[in-house]
Image (cartoon, rainbow, N blue to C red):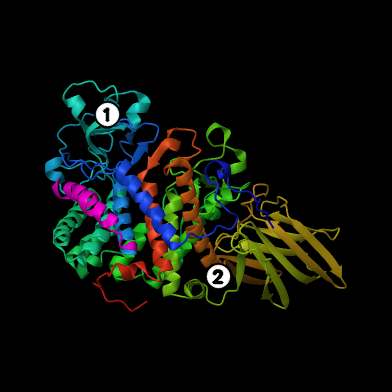
Amino acid sequence: MRKIPAIILFLCLAVLPCIADEPLALSKDEVRSFMKKLATFVAEKHMRTSRDSMQHGMTYEYRDMRREKSPGCFVQGEALDTMHDGAWFGAAMVNASLATGDPLYRDLLEKNVLPFYCRMLNHSDKIFSNKLNHARPSAQQTWSGQKEWLLQDGEKGFVPYWWDDGGSVSLERQRDKNQFPAFPSFDQFVKDEKPNPEFVLSGYSLGSSNHLAQDLGVLLQLSWLYYREYKGKDGDCFRSELSDAAQNLQASRMRHHGHIPMCDAPAALVLSDPAFMRLVPDASALGPALLNNHYKQALEAAVSEKKYPTPAFADDQQYKYYAALARHGKLPKAAAFKLVYDALTEPRLYHYYSDDAKVAAGMNRFDLHPINFTNGRPADYRSDKKGPSGKPRPMGSRFGPQNMIQCALGLQAFAQFPDLWDSSIDALFKGIPRVNIHDPLVDSDKNVPVKIKLGSHDLYLEASQYSLGIKVILPVAMKKITIMQANDPKRHGCDLIIKEDGKLEARNFEGTSLKGKFSATLEGNNRVIDCVIPTTIDKSQAPWMNSIELEKYTIKMGEEQVEFILASRQVDVVKWLEREIAGGILNWRGIFATKGFIPTGIETGADWDHYSDTGGYAHLISACAQYLNHLDGKKDWEVLRLPVLIESDGR
């Protein structure tokens, strides 16, 4: 079996001094204190609070912590969805307020975040115009061939990539030293024919995106549900503003794209329209399609040499979760299973990349530095040091903290459905034997083989994320056992072969010998086969197949064969979710204490190490809030008090 080095990920000495091999959990009071510090930091360091500005309430995505004065300290990418961080921060304020009751979060939401976004969504037809495009000549036609991005004349519900009055600088223009916009934009400096040597942003982007729209959908849905229960005067005002904003957002995306569940859902909620809500996909059906994600695609590698990306965000998981809540008025069991499956498996890809160090809880890749898989394994491993300046590839504050939210929601799902994992697997794979994927991160005990019947033979199988083991007693005359991945049996698998000298070897289907521990011992007229074979994910192994969560496999001996699936034990799945959320909060609190801010990238060897990232704070605050809900025995979908527009069968 693969041994995991007992060393902490490479940031231990630099920014993770508090990590223990088994992360401890913070108390509820410590969690509340941490999330309040994060929210206060964003309010003080990232948010425009001047009421004499149209940008009042805007939250800048990046703050350069090496600079203390505007505009140079605020950096915005001209096509980086810079407005989405404020939307996620607003969603976090709703989650934090509902979890703690602390007035700070409602105050930030009411006085800053919501007025800013409602201003744009409800008055974009008056604020923005597509009549002038000041982009540099090479960028004039960017987005012109596709309707998703470009502002249409006179439309409501449009939120541009960026909108500023001189309070920030352009990421792109700082780098290429060109004073003209890098993407289609209205630029006040160009219009006034004034020089802009500091590359200040004054104007607005002419582009937006479906991605940004879905982030806004989450904000609007949570905020409308929040104020739906609020009886005060401000609640009445915001309900109306949010209702208009949700409808305008949905109408804008229809003009630019078509139906998008996370834009349809809030609009259907505010309209209380069951027919409209039926546009949002039904999330109550359990089926094999739920198992399709980055993890499965990367490890299966259905297309040779194709690059399969590791996830940079958990945005899609959030969209599916909130759309499912809106559609059903609760969390259906199938949606709960999908939530847990993704929260368990998606982070593993980064763990596979990190072949020479254990990954600390809550940590994952930097979103702007890709890590890809080819042929079922990382294109390069951490030990290859293909990152900046000959170091490993950097980590970041996006996917790790976002997945922590999903882990906390997953724990709430287990409180709702105590047999969620096991019963879902039983329904998906009726009657197929199940072999445990052992994970030493959450189960320090020795792996216990599972007995499976193959004709008259007893097979004993064991698996980890990095290997497959088999033990069986065979007649001496039998010379070969074949192990196959059921969905691609011609390509993924190996033959265990008894050679002329009586020794056991394994070869993939191209005839290449595989590394492993092999034993074939004679006992009378039988031979005891015992082997452990590292899977393709092991850097030193020749390709054959991987141990994939909820994948089906076949073992064939002679004319007989048997299928089995690989699946973690439910108790270990729960432990994984607990480790990621509880240990992740502890680890990120250590980073915040050590660096003084939440960086967007760690060990990037570039400016990203010095950029405080609103998205990181937002996701950590929501993770803390959902963890507190779990500890308090609350469930997010019950706290939100969702209306039921479409009656379901109760699943």
How many numbered markers are drawn? 2
Quadrant of the image containing the N terminus: bottom right
Instruction: Identify the magenta region.
Output: 100-123
Residue 200 tag number: 1
**Residue under the image location 52 percent in, 34 percent down:** 388
- Left of 413 or right of it: where is 223? left
Structural crowding at the residue carrying mark 2, measured as other residues with C-alpha within 10 Å and reported as few (<14), some (14–19) or many (≥20): few
| Residue 278 pos. (x, y %) | 25, 67
| Three-letter code, disc 1 | Val
Quadrant of the image containing the C terminus: bottom left
Residue 571 tag number: 2
Give residue 41's quadrant in the image: top left
| Residue 515 pos. (x, y %) | 72, 52
In the rendered structure, does residue 105 fall within the stretch colored magenta? yes
Disc 1 element = strand
In the rendered structure, does residue 583 fall within the stretch colored magenta? no
| Residue 295 pos. (x, y %) | 50, 55
